[in-house]
């Protein structure tokens, strides 16, 4: 195959793959937001078929020849073309070992499991979901062995979400978090808690929807390219930089729940909205890794969204929309309330200090479920025991326990550590940003444009063109140091609680 023919074949593959990914993404979004609850069976069949077609687009001899040709002629192609071929070859090498029948069956399974999970969570019925989780675990073990039988299965899964991650790198990371943060969490628990009662009054959902629109405007999210919908477990779908969808879930007696969900998912959206135009409809669009993507959502949610400066900008907006509920509340009271640290049940509602413990629990769960040390029927008891050990809380039901997250229903085993890594990355990104300019005067005015521009230049615009390690180095200018994250949390909550 000539180099010209190889490049043409790769471009055709990219166009077709984007089209199928777009179609399957819309189906998935519809299933989680607007589709009737009984529609999963038909959607699962469609998703299984489309995934099979998408598999065959990539896994064939002609594509392999085209990719090998491009990779053999690095000096004669553009850096972008070489990186595209490199990423496709990684996907090819991972997928070619998986029989197409199993690939299609797994796609059908996770679509069905997602619908079962929604109903099981609503009814607090773990036994209804357990058989699906068991099959998902089995498939993940099998797929990991197909990819690299020489490594522990969980290491292979971790590497799929964050290149280079393994239990060898993550065990010390989570050990550091547990050892260094445990005394801070204990010391905070012995101090008087800030008043949060004003956040737990009756907040009409109709007005909360208006508030979500205001938050998106404050974040600088263009509404002609990004919409918001409602679902049980918030997520973001990006089809291209001109069509990004975020979701949230409203609680009428907890305005902060959706508020920080919108800011978190908005961070994901800003990343995808900021990727370079020339990468759209190619495999260079999107985030460099799950950890890098979560660094952006957690950056906006916590480092910006829970800062004193942002609370000063947020207060007048909330007082205008919720005058009765927010009457007499000061910016300092709001800042302390949204940073209340207390061991809790629900990860997505956890404070910034105890949040890493929620991720550490899931990390331990995943290690053992993939290794086979625990079976699916034992998982709820294990979950409850770890929550008692790590956070000192009693889990009252599976709905607020093992059924609270959608990730395992979607087959995303190995994803959770990305949240903790992303949070840690974000702290060093802030340090690097503050060396270039002081973001806080703008943030206090509700203007995040310079913050987003800096992140856009360092991270967003590069999409997948740079490797995750290159993006991180480009953003922080030094090596990753998780101790910076622990120092940041210790300093912040020492100040908040006057430890």
Image (spheres, helix red, strand yellow):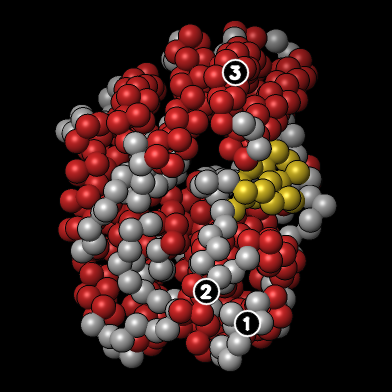
From the viewer's side, name the closer residue of 382 and 498: 382
Q: Which residue is identified by label 2?
A: 201
- The label on residue 324 is 1
Label 2, secondary structure: give it.
Answer: loop
Q: Residues within 10 Å of mark 3 (few under 14, many from 20)?
A: few
Q: Up-down: is 279 above or below 476?
A: above
Label 3, secondary structure: give it.
Answer: helix
Q: CA distance from mark 1 to mark 3?
A: 47 Å
- Residue 255 visible here: yes
Q: Up-down: is 344 above or below 160?
A: below
Label 1, secondary structure: give it.
Answer: loop
Answer whether labels 1 and 3 touch (C-beta < 8 Å).
no
Q: CA distance from mark 3 to mark 2?
A: 41 Å
Image coordinates for residue 400, horizontal then vertical, percent: 35, 51
Q: Residues within 10 Å of mark 1 (few under 14, many from 20)?
A: few
What residue is rendered at 73% in x and 26% in y?
Answer: 19
Image coordinates for residue 499, horizontal then vertical, percent: 29, 88
Answer whether labels 2 and 1 touch (C-beta < 8 Å).
yes
Image coordinates for residue 314, horizontal then vertical, percent: 64, 78
What residue is rendered at 50% in x and 10% in y?
Answer: 100
- Residue 267 visible here: no
Q: Up-down: is 77 above or below 362?
A: above
Q: Quadrant of the N terminus?
A: top right
What residue is rendered at 26% in x and 78% in y?
Answer: 189
Q: Nearer the viewer, mark 3 or mark 2?
A: 2
Q: Up-down: is 489 above or below 57?
A: below
Residue 438 position by quadrant? bottom right
Q: Which residue is identified by label 3?
A: 42
Q: Earlier in the sequence, mark 1 or mark 3?
A: 3
Q: Earlier in the sequence, mark 3 or mark 2?
A: 3
């Amino acid at each position: 195959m000539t180099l010209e023919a190889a490049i043409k074949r790769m471009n055709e593959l990219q166009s077709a793959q984007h089209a199928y990914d777009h179609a399957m993404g819309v189906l998935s979004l519809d299933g989680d937001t607007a589709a009737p609850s009984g529609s999963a069976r038909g959607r699962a069949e469609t998703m299984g078929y489309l995934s099979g077609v998408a598999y065959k687009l990539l896994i064939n001899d002609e594509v392999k020849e085209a990719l090998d040709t491009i990779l053999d002629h690095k000096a004669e192609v553009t850096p972008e073309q070489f990186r595209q071929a490199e990423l496709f070859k990684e996907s090819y090498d991972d997928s070619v070992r998986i029989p197409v029948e199993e690939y299609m069956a797994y796609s059908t399974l996770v679509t069905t499991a997602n619908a079962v999970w929604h109903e099981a969570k609503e009814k607090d019925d773990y036994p209804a979901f357990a058989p699906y989780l068991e099959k998902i675990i089995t498939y993940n073990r099998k797929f990991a062995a197909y990819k690299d039988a020489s490594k522990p299965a969980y290491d292979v899964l971790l590497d799929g979400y964050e290149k280079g991650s393994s239990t060898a790198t993550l065990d010390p990371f989570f050990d550091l978090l547990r050892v260094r943060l445990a005394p801070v969490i204990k010391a905070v628990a012995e101090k008087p808690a800030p008043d949060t009662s004003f956040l737990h009054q009756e907040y009409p959902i109709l007005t909360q929807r208006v508030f979500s629109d205001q938050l998106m405007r404050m974040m600088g999210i263009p509404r002609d390219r990004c919409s918001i919908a409602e679902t049980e477990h918030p997520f973001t779908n990006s089809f291209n930089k001109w069509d990004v969808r975020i979701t949230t879930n409203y609680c009428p007696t907890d305005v902060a729940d959706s508020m920080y969900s919108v800011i978190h998912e908005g961070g994901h959206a800003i990343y995808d909205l900021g990727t370079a135009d020339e990468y759209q409809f190619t495999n260079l669009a999107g985030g460099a890794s799950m950890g890098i993507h979560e660094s952006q959502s957690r950056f906006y949610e916590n480092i910006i969204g829970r800062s004193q400066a942002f609370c000063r900008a947020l207060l007048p907006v909330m007082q205008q929309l919720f005058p009765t509920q927010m009457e007499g509340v000061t910016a300092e009271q709001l800042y302390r309330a949204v940073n209340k640290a207390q061991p809790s049940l629900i990860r997505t509602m956890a404070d910034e200090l105890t949040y890493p413990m929620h991720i550490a629990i899931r990390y331990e769960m995943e290690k053992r479920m993939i290794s086979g040390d625990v079976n699916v029927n034992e998982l709820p008891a294990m979950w409850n025991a770890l929550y008692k050990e790590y956070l000192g809380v009693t889990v009252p039901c599976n709905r607020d326990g093992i059924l609270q997250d959608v990730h395992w229903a979607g087959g995303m085993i190995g994803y959770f550590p990305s949240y903790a890594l992303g949070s840690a990355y974000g702290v060093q990104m802030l340090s690097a940003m503050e060396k270039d300019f002081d973001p806080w005067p703008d943030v206090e005015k509700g203007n995040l444009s310079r913050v987003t521009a800096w992140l856009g230049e360092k991270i967003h615009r590069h999409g997948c063109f740079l490797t995750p390690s290159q993006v991180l180095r480009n953003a922080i200018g030094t090596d990753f140091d998780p101790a910076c994250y622990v120092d940041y949390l210790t300093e912040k909550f020492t100040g908040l609680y006057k430890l």
